[in-house]
Amino acid sequence: MADFRIIVSDKNTGLAHQVEVSGSHANSFIGKSIGDVVSGDAVGLSGYSLKIKGGTDKGGFPMRSGLPGSPRRKILVTGGVGFKSLVKGMRRRKTMGGEEISSDISQINMVVEEYGSKSIDELLGGGAGEEGTNEESTEEVA
């Protein structure tokens, strides 16, 4: 059985929310690829559409778009996901995972494509919004 940590980024507010998904909801992500748009119901965001942007496997290796399948491979890269060149033209062989989600993936990064009627804070129970209000209240007391 697969367990995933889903990171949902809201491009309007700039906030990211972390959700743990397991069981049948997690199995709905297996077989999807980077760039696919999925329903937010599995994450608890009914009425939302989410786009898969990437992720990492259990060893911390990033998923790379354009690399078919799900297993890790050593590829020669010049830039992009997983490698930032220090010198112009530098190439390096890096281990990266494919673009397909399998049970080896531990984190999936997603961005909101279509918004629902309720806000993300209401549906996910606060998240980053609650932390910000707690910090403000402690500053007022101090």
Image: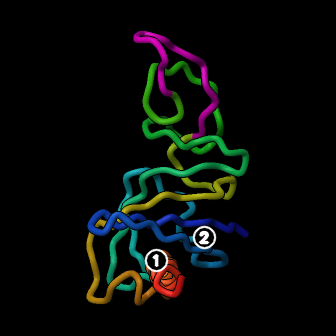
- Residue 123 coordinates in the image, percent (x, y): 43, 88
Q: At 54% from the left edge and 70% from the top edge, which residue is drawn?
A: 18
Foreground label between 2 and 1? 1
Q: Quadrant of the N terminus?
A: bottom right
Residue 90 lies in the magenta stretch:
yes
Q: Amino acid at mark 1?
A: Gly
Q: Which type of secondary structure does the marked residue at label 1 adopt?
A: helix
Nearer the N terminus, badge 2 or badge 1?
A: 2
Magenta-drawn segment: 84-97
CA–CA distance in space, label 2 to label 1: 33 Å
Q: Residues within 10 Å of mark 1 (few under 14, many from 20)?
A: few
- Can residue 68 be seen? yes
Is disc 2 placed on a helix, strand or loop? helix
Which amino acid type is marked by label 2? Asn
Label 1 sits on residue: 132
Q: Image height check: is 124 above or below 53?
A: below
Estimate the x, y position of residue 56 in percent, counting from the top left.
60, 49
Q: Is residue 45 left or right of residue 26?
A: left
Quadrant containing the C terminus is bottom right
Please give the name of the residue rendered at 33% of the width and 77% of the height, measured from the top-left corner.
Answer: 48
Residue 2 lies in what quarter of the image? bottom right
Can residue 42 be seen in the rendering of this structure? no
Mark 2 and mark 1 residues within 8 Å of each other at the beta carbon: no
Residue pictured at 65% horizontal, 58% vertical: 106
Q: Foreground residue, 3 or 9?
A: 9
Residue at the spot of label 2:
27
Q: Tell me, yes or no, whether the highlighted magenta stretch contains residue 114.
A: no
